[in-house]
Amino acid sequence: MGEVGQSFFALLPIFLNIFFSIWAYRDSRSRGNSKEFSLIALIAVLAFPIIGLVIYLVIRRD
């Protein structure tokens, strides 16, 4: 695998983390939650990538 492939796979988790953080914020806002709650969701998913996303998916409103 070349240098570009290694760089891609090294940066993929970072890009996914940022993507899911932004998604959690937008999803929270679209469900009518406050800006503060949405910001906490964004920070939680950004700081704790896997567990933060799982917790957000459990506590969000349907």
Image: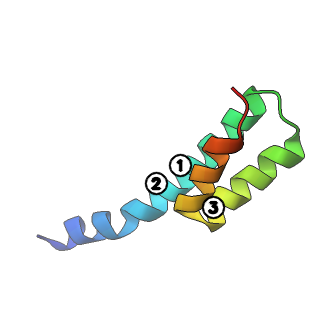
- For the residues labelled 2 and 1, say whether their Cβ atoms are less than 8 Å apart: yes
Q: Is residue 55 above or below residue 33?
A: below
The C terminus: image quadrant = top right
Residue ID for mark 2? 16
Classify 10 Å Cα crowding around label 2: few (below 14), some (14-19), many (20 and above): few
Please state which amino acid type lies under the numbered disc 3. Answer: Leu
Q: Earlier in the sequence, mark 2 or mark 3?
A: 2
Q: Is residue 40 left or right of residue 55?
A: right
How far, Cα to Cα, is label 2 from label 3? 10 Å
| Residue position marked by numbered label 3 in the rendering | 46
Residue at point 67%, 34% (across, down): 27
Q: Tell me the kind of residue under disc 1.
A: Phe
Camera-side residue: 19 or 53?
A: 53
Q: Residue at x 71, y 42 (%)?
A: 59
The residue positioned farthest toward the left in the image shown: 1
Would you call the spot at circle 3 few (<14 residues within 10 Å), some (14-19), or many (20 or more)? many
In the image, residue 35 sits, relative to residue 43, either above or below, namely above
Mark 2 residue type:
Leu
Residue drawn where x is 57% and y is 60% of the image: 51
Residue 30: quadrant of the picture = top right
Q: In the rendered view, does 9 fall on the left or right side of 25? A: left
Estimate the spatial distance between the alpha carbons at disc 2 and disc 1, rounded to whole Å: 5 Å
**Sooner in the amino-acid sequence: mark 3 or mark 1:** 1
Instruction: Name the spot of residue 38 as percent of width and height, x first.
Output: 78, 44
Image position of 33 (left or right of 16):
right
Do residues under tags 2 and 3 come within 8 Å of each other at their CB atoms?
A: no
Residue at label 1?
Answer: 19
Q: Place residue 11 in its image quadrant.
A: bottom left
Residue nearer the viewer, 57 or 45: 57
- If the image is split into quadrants, where does the N terminus sit? bottom left
